[in-house]
Image: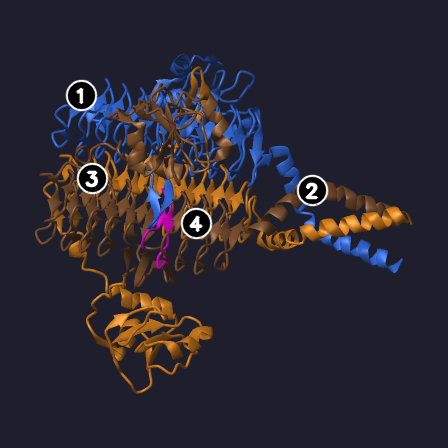
Chain colours: A blue, B brown, C orange
Amino acid sequence: MQPMKLAMKPMRLSEVAALVGGELVGDADPEIRGVAALEDAQDGDLTFVARSALLPRLADSSATGVLVGPDMAPELPAVRCQDPFRAFGVVLGRLLPPQDRLFPPGIHPTAVIAEDADVGAVASIGPYCVIGAGCRIGEGTRLGPHVTLMPDVTIGSNCELHPQVTVREGCVLGSEVIVHVGAAIGTEGFGYVTGDEGLEHVPQVGTVLIGDRVEIGAGTCIDRATTGATVIATGSKIDNLIQIGHNVKMGRHCALSAQTGISGSCVLGDGVTAGGQVGIADHVNIGSGVRIGAQSGIMKDVASGASVFGSPALDVGEAFRILGAMRKLPAMLRRLAKLERESDQE
Amino acid sequence: MQPMKLAMKPMRLSEVAALVGGELVGDADPEIRGVAALEDAQDGDLTFVARSALLPRLADSSATGVLVGPDMAPELPAVRCQDPFRAFGVVLGRLLPPQDRLFPPGIHPTAVIAEDADVGAVASIGPYCVIGAGCRIGEGTRLGPHVTLMPDVTIGSNCELHPQVTVREGCVLGSEVIVHVGAAIGTEGFGYVTGDEGLEHVPQVGTVLIGDRVEIGAGTCIDRATTGATVIATGSKIDNLIQIGHNVKMGRHCALSAQTGISGSCVLGDGVTAGGQVGIADHVNIGSGVRIGAQSGIMKDVASGASVFGSPALDVGEAFRILGAMRKLPAMLRRLAKLERESDQE
Amino acid sequence: MQPMKLAMKPMRLSEVAALVGGELVGDADPEIRGVAALEDAQDGDLTFVARSALLPRLADSSATGVLVGPDMAPELPAVRCQDPFRAFGVVLGRLLPPQDRLFPPGIHPTAVIAEDADVGAVASIGPYCVIGAGCRIGEGTRLGPHVTLMPDVTIGSNCELHPQVTVREGCVLGSEVIVHVGAAIGTEGFGYVTGDEGLEHVPQVGTVLIGDRVEIGAGTCIDRATTGATVIATGSKIDNLIQIGHNVKMGRHCALSAQTGISGSCVLGDGVTAGGQVGIADHVNIGSGVRIGAQSGIMKDVASGASVFGSPALDVGEAFRILGAMRKLPAMLRRLAKLERESDQE
């Protein structure tokens, strides 16, 4: 199997430079007909080199042009720019399929829309969408096939909801929010009390508030609050298959990698990042700018700016010192036994 | 962004006392117009204090009334009751949106229902539901939009299946079962044998049996048995994004937190609780009442009543003693080296 | 609750022997009316014993016939064969519900199919499927209800896509691919650069290529590549709730257990196996035949043929030696202190 290559409208490297706000290096101005990572690039492709250390690999590449950082001097025809990968992203944006093909304009005749729902300005509502009573959707928002909005959902402008997304009653999304395939927003949290016949569900009458420019991954679940709201603030990015418990308050510009789980009533500051499969126990406060290593388990509060790792999580420096020492443990056991023998013989 | 507050039909605190079977404390009988957690409560709100240690925080709260335990004497107008959080849940139950708004009565005209399916007594079948041949659904059960029942599924009375739920052929749900958005019940388990052309799937001809009052979280997957049945017994609660392997037998009143995975053929007793992201290897027996800490990994049987933690999981006491000792490991290395130097010098 | 038993068309044990290519042992040729695991088997059932060590359990079983390995001599009427569990699977295959009941032949009238989509040879398209412009689907492929194919998806022959599956634009599936309930193929990866207003999404213009006979579990997410393709090669099996990041290249005949996550740009060789809840950091290379224990976390390359375990993962031998030594840690602390006291007294 060969990966298909997207047909790109050809452009000169000088046009790439203009597009990304960079500087064409050298006299050559080749035609660019595709894009690819360094190791996959073929004749006609534009690629990028993000770090000087990777520059030598260009020698083995068939790329025709390269985006490089301000201090790099490659052999290939190049565009110098502040952030080569970001500039590469700008070029990629030119290759996206036309939005009208993915989200055909207008309301598909099979969509079931409550009479009092306000969808007048919506750009696209796909086949088999279900939009409940009292919903309001802003201008330019696009819904893929099979999106379900339960009653009284509010969605801002220019959002993108992919197929099979469900938003439960009363939840609120800001503008430019992207929700990927099959995500579930506003499901009831896991709150129980012990009653006469076992566990009794505590009604979850709160909601979910999602800020602007938030992105929510495929299959991710965000529980509604018991009272008040579960909050994901502006600009935060949440990867696939993540669990956000009821009453979590997440700050701005956080980035959580896939399969992470945040238990109920946690508070995260701004700019928190988490690797994949992180778990955070309930009612824990995570300060702003905290960095959490993959698979960490956090059982107590973490101060702003800290980097933590491990389960239970420790300061990353201490965690790695312990991990290093652990590899010496079997030898330590032998060394300890030897000392004990010597001590006995005295 | 401010969390929206649900409009509550106002009630006197004495009415709250009557509703929850509690005792009004003091002479005041203020009007309650909303509900909120202690830290969010504003004028007019009812809140609760579950533990005496939290009572002092009431001084900073704007709440108008509070539910407290039998031995607490708060400054605020209060209702004393056996279990304040459970009583709070009873009040929350009064605030749920009307079921008819979420699950409009009757069968939506877009539902595709097999001719021989028995859905006569179902309370609500939402838009675009698909109900296969031979299905039987009990009285008062509600299906949200886009629910798919493959052929020969049996569902008891007063169940609630949220949008995008799929139940595969032949599975059986009891009564008062709640299944959240996008859960998948009865998918084929991960069973293979090595054949001539790599892995060959072993047909999974068993089914899934779900007892009464079971709750199944959003995105959770429960695999059908190879032969016989995967069983989730009465009253068990399963959070979001959980994996239950084929032929698992789970007892009554278990509670599993999000992202936990139980491998094939495990047997869990009654009342087992698991924190989030727990993993259990296949064919493991977990006794009744076992408590499993978050992120634990269980590789062998656990006796009834035990509390375990860690990966691989140990008795919780031993696990924490080891974790405590691990933090001393780097220092132990230095101490050991010092002793060795001293020993050499002798 | 009793598991329902599938009604099997009765067959003689000698017919079972012929079906699985085995040898009937003894003179009895009883009638087989059902199948069950050893511990569940009742009168009339066929069961299997995969290992000699389990043979004594047959004494307590009510099974009527048993599949055994070449070197076993059970008391019960038996069929001897090379691989008893594989043979059992062959018999199970006879018990699957008829495909026509699960996937009724033809195109359901509610399916929304783009005019230029090529679905002429598809065996079954279920209710409420949505098939976008430019899609091509091969002969004999079956789509359950609510399957969404965004534009320009290519699917080979004899595939099975279960309810609620979504395949995003431009992705390619081979033949005999099985995709379970709610899986999402081709969603955008988690790729960002830091821009002026926080994180900016890097457009993901690549695709996903799935080889022949691949199986993808319920709720699993496979991200499309930034450029080029995310690849899952022939014969690989991916369990439920797994995350595959953008640009991953997975070899042939890999088997990943549930809730595993593979970060972006990882390369896996052929025949890699992973237990449940494994995590692999981005850009890591895993050689062919590597075996990864459950809950392991892999942060760096692993050589072909290795077995690794732990988080961070180590060679499985070293990992278990360390785990064994860890249980002695609290005692080591005491032994070390005793030696120090003795050393001080000298």
Residue furthest bottom as drawn: C27
Whichever of labels 4 and 3 marks the residue nearer the N terminus, that label is: 3
Q: Is residue C140 left or right of residue C209?
A: left
From the viewer's side, name the closer residue of C216 and A258: A258
Residue C271: image location, x then y, percent: 45, 53
Look at mark 2 in the image and give the residue it sits on.
B328
Q: Amino acid at mark 4?
A: Thr
Q: Amino acid at mark 3?
A: Gly
* Label 3 environment density (alpha carbons within 10 Å; few <14, some 14–19, many ≥20): many
Q: Is residue A274 visible?
A: no
Q: Give the label, 2 or 4, closer to the camera.
A: 4
Secondary structure beneath label 1: loop
From the viewer's side, name the closer residue of C194 and A273: A273
Which residues are the magenta region? B234-250
Mark 1 → mark 2, Cα distance in angstroms: 62 Å
**CB-based contact (under 8 Å), mark 2 and mark 4:** no
Q: Chain of mark 2?
A: B
Q: Is residue B323 above or below residue A226?
A: below
Q: Which mark, by number, is residue B144? A: 3
Look at mark 1 in the image and give the residue it sits on.
A118
Q: Quadrant of the N terminus of chain C?
A: bottom left
Q: Which mark, by number, is residue B273? A: 4
